[in-house]
Image (cartoon, rainbow, N blue to C red):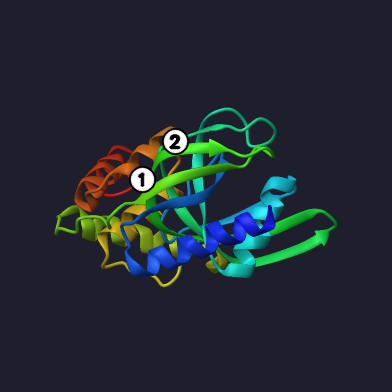
């Protein structure tokens, strides 16, 4: 089991270095929340399948994939995941209680799930292809969305803010706004899947206007 994880993690890291849009195997962690590129998540891991996955990723400095659950639950029988997810890199960990691993992860590139297999312990191994970065284009909504985001950041704990802050990046602003706004997970997933940063900001700006959060 451990050698399998090490091989998968090592192969993935090597392939990512050679070609950012490669196809490879990736261990998946289905969640009831959406991880965005550059975003942060705190995870509590206690199932053996995910403990082994996390240990391997810590050892090899390789990512695993976070995917929103389409059907099922986070524990027990393997859930049915959405087909677009985000690479998660471990940035910190703790084990205050025996058998319960606390992970802090940060989102990186997005990927598309092409196919999957389920191991005997229930861990999902996905065959994934990496998705290209958003198309970046100037849009009139960018400035208003970025200014609103700046105001929100002043009022929240700095530890919860994704760094480095890139208010001039339409993709980064769109991801951070989607994290903060009270959308259902299904809506956040659809926004994650968009490949046009301008379209994402247009949607978010309309919501902010409708809620009278921006003029």
x 25%, y 57%: residue:
144
Please rate how many residues cluster around mark 1, counting C-alpha atoms within 10 Å: few if below 14, some from 14 to 19, many from 20: many
Q: Nearer the viewer, residue 205 or 128?
A: 128
- Residue at (44, 45) in percent of width and height: 127
Residue 140 rendering spot, x and y as whole percentages: 15, 55
Image position, residue 15 (x, y; %): 40, 63
- Inspect this view and state whether residue 57 appears: yes
Label 1 or label 2, whichever comes before in sequence order: 2
- Examine the image and state in which quarter residue 143 appears: bottom left
The residue under label 1 is 192
Left or right of 17 on screen, residue 119: right
> Number of marks in the image?
2
Q: Are marks 1 and 2 in contact (CB under 8 Å)?
A: no
Q: Quick one: 32 or 113, which is closer to the camera?
A: 113
Q: Does dot 2 land on a helix, a strand or a loop?
A: loop
Residue 100: numbered disc? none
Residue in the foreground of this view, choosing between 119 and 157: 119
The answer to whether 118 appears left or right of 49 in the picture is left
Residue displayed at 51% across by 48% down = 66
User: In the displayed structure, does residue 60 sit left or right of residue 203?
Assistant: right
Outermost residue to the top: 71
Please name which of the two marks, 1 or 2, marks the residue nearer to the observer. Answer: 2
Question: Is disc 1 placed on a helix, strand or loop?
Answer: helix
Distance CA(mark 1)–CA(mark 2):
11 Å
Is residue 162 visible in the rendered structure shown here? no
Task: From the top left corner, tell me how far across and down residue 202 is, in percent.
Answer: 22, 45
Note whether 76 is above or below 103 in the view shown: above
Q: Residue at x 68, y 57 (%)?
A: 2
User: Label 2 belongs to which residue?
Assistant: 82
User: Please, which residue is most extreme toward the bottom here?
Assistant: 164
Is disc 2 surrounded by few (<14), some (14 to 19) or many (20+) residues within 10 Å?
some
Residue 95, percent across and down?
A: 78, 62
């Amino acid at each position: 089991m451990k050698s399998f994880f090490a091989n998968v993690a090592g192969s993935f890291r090597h392939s990512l270095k050679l070609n950012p849009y490669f196809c490879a195997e990736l261990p998946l962690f289905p969640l009831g929340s959406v991880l965005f590129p550059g975003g942060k998540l705190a995870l509590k891991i206690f199932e053996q399948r995910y403990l082994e996955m996390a240990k391997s990723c810590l050892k090899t400095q390789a990512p695993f994939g976070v995917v929103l659950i389409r059907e099922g639950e986070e524990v027990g029988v393997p859930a049915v995941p959405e087909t677009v997810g985000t690479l998660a890199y471990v940035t910190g960990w703790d084990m205050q209680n025996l058998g319960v691993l606390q992970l802090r992860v940060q989102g990186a590139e997005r990927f598309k799930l092409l196919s999957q297999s389920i191991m005997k312990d229930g861990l999902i191994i996905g065959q994934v292809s990496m998705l290209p970065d958003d198309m970046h284009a100037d849009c009139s909504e960018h400035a208003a969305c970025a200014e609103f985001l700046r105001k929100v950041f002043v009022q929240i704990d700095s530890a919860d803010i994704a760094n480095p802050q890139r208010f001039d990046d339409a993709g980064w602003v769109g991801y951070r706004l989607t994290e903060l706004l009270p959308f259902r997970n299904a809506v956040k997933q659809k926004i994650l899947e968009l490949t046009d940063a301008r379209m994402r900001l247009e949607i978010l700006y309309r919501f902010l206007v409708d809620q009278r959060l921006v003029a």
